[in-house]
Amino acid sequence: MLSPEMTQILGALHAGTGSGLDVGCVSVLGMDHLVVSLVVEGRVTEQLWSSGSVGASFEDLQFTLGQGPGLDALRTSQAAVEHDVATVGAARWPALVEAMAHLPIGAMFCLPLALGGITVGVLTALRASPGPMSGQEMDDALGLASALTLQFLGGAGTRFESWLDAQPDGELHRAVVHQATGMLSVQLALPLGEALLRLRAYAYSHDRSIIEAAEDVVSRRLRLDDDGPEPESPKETKG
């Protein structure tokens, strides 16, 4: 059964009063960070809403490395839950475990936004301290995931554009990544999927955010045909 607080949140979500979610749902779930991601192509997701920078950074790491609980939830259409990140073996997500060490994340809960055989996205809940959700918190999280699924499938009243309104300049979080991928596809004569893999590989091997790498490609400071020159630093580009 949903809590009164989550019932109120879902009522506002259905009525379309506001853009996306209210940060109040984070505390209702007993979490520190929430992220909503939407499938845009195959198993590629787009971060549609985040309650803060930690969740956004974690989601970008999963996107860059191509591994993590969110991708597992997307692949299996089942919840991917880790009650204690410190006990996760490096063999499960070898690159992610090391890369996320600086983030204050002790527990991860990734719920697929799925109906039948259709999965439209992932709801990611993160908490600094380890431990499971309470029964009430899990009921509320599952209720939120179901409501988001129906909304993105077109079964609820809120328009998709209301989520875009929450993005800077009304653009998707990774719009520059998609633009850079298209440019690399043309430059390297590669399918879009392989071009994205090249961009991911560059970002990971150079310990950079995929957003930053994409911005360098779009601004033509970086070419990946020969792994390109190192992009200029912000100070050098301002001079």
Image (spheres, rainbow, N blue to C red):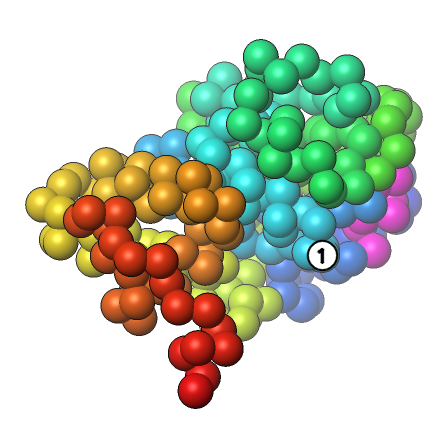
Please name the amino acid that badge 1 sits on: Gly
Q: Residue at x 9, y 45 (%)?
A: 189
**Is 30 part of what is drawn in magenta?**
yes
Q: Residue at x 16, y 40 (%)?
A: 191
Picture coordinates of residue 128 (x, y %)? 84, 38
Picture coordinates of residue 10 (x, y %)? 73, 49
Relative depth, front residue between 170 and 151: 170
Left or right of 167 on screen, residue 236: left
Magenta segment: 24-31
Q: Secondary structure at mark 1?
A: loop
The quadrant the N terminus occupies is top right
The quadrant the C terminus occupies is bottom left
Q: Is residue 44 visible?
A: yes
Picture coordinates of residue 231 (x, y %)? 37, 63
| Residue, far bottom | 239
Q: Residue at x 64, y 21 (%)?
A: 80
What residue is shown with label 1? 52
Left or right of 44 on screen, residue 82: right
Res. 14 image quadrant: bottom right
Picture coordinates of residue 7 (x, y %)? 81, 46
